[in-house]
Amino acid sequence: MERDPIEWMVLKEEPHRCLCVSRYLLDCKPYHEAPANVIWQECTLRRWLNHDFFLSAFSEEEREKILLSTVENPAGNTQDYMFLLSTEEVEALFDDEAEDYVDYEERGALTTAFARSQGAWFMDEDCEEQNRGCWWLRYYGDFHDREEGAYDFISCVNFDGYIERAAQGVEETDSCVRPAFWLRTD
């Protein structure tokens, strides 16, 4: 099945760069290839995002505009072009503090036809949440838990936009990938 062009959302703007995330759940991959207490730095999904996905989803010209970024994790920071959001980032970036409003609809993203063809779990009932899936976060819990790698499961954002702390075993193959990256704007 051919993949559709990727649509990106800007979640945060800073001088000279902006944080982008895919609007839709693009693919369905395990966080790690086997059950294990694994950290972001060592998981197979990180390798896939920063190699296979990065090289296939972007042209050479586009890749030159994507910044190699320091990604903060409880077990140690990493240098990544592509990464998953953390619990804290999701809570901050999909929340309008001025209005005290959480945008659960944008958090609870739709799966692409490609992701569904790869085995993604999605809400298949004829309802408002139809085709919404769940998507991996970078580690279990939040940064202050300091428990990255302590368990063989990872947090996810559920179809309804709520964060599930102990959502999926790392080897599960029905959670989706919603990549994020920092884009150079100058």
Image: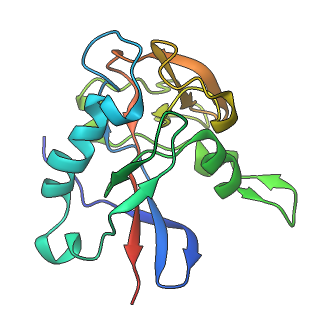
**Residue at position x 87%, y 63% in the image:** 99
Residue placed at 63% from the left, 37% from the top?
Answer: 143
Is residue 53 left or right of 174 when viewed as pictured? left
Q: Is 186 positioned to the left or the right of 141 in the image? A: left
Residue 38: x percent and y percent? Answer: 39, 21
Q: Name the image quarter holding residue 162.
A: top right
- Image height of 17 relative to 145, above or below: below
**In the orientation shown, which residue stands out farthest toward the front?**
76
With respect to residue 14, does 94 lie above or below? above
Residue at the image position 64 percent from the left and 34 percent from the top: 160
Which residue shows up at 54% across the image and 30% down it?
A: 156
- Residue 28 appears anywhere in the view: no
Q: Point out the residue furthest to the top here.
A: 35
Position of the N terminus by quadrant: top left
Looking at the image, residue 133 lies above or below residue 183: above
Where residue 93 appears, x then y in whole percent?
65, 57
The quadrant the C terminus occupies is: bottom left
Q: Position of residue 139 (x, y in %)?
A: 51, 31
Residue 70 located left or right of residue 74? left
Badge count: 0
Q: Nearer the viewer, residue 97 or 130?
A: 97
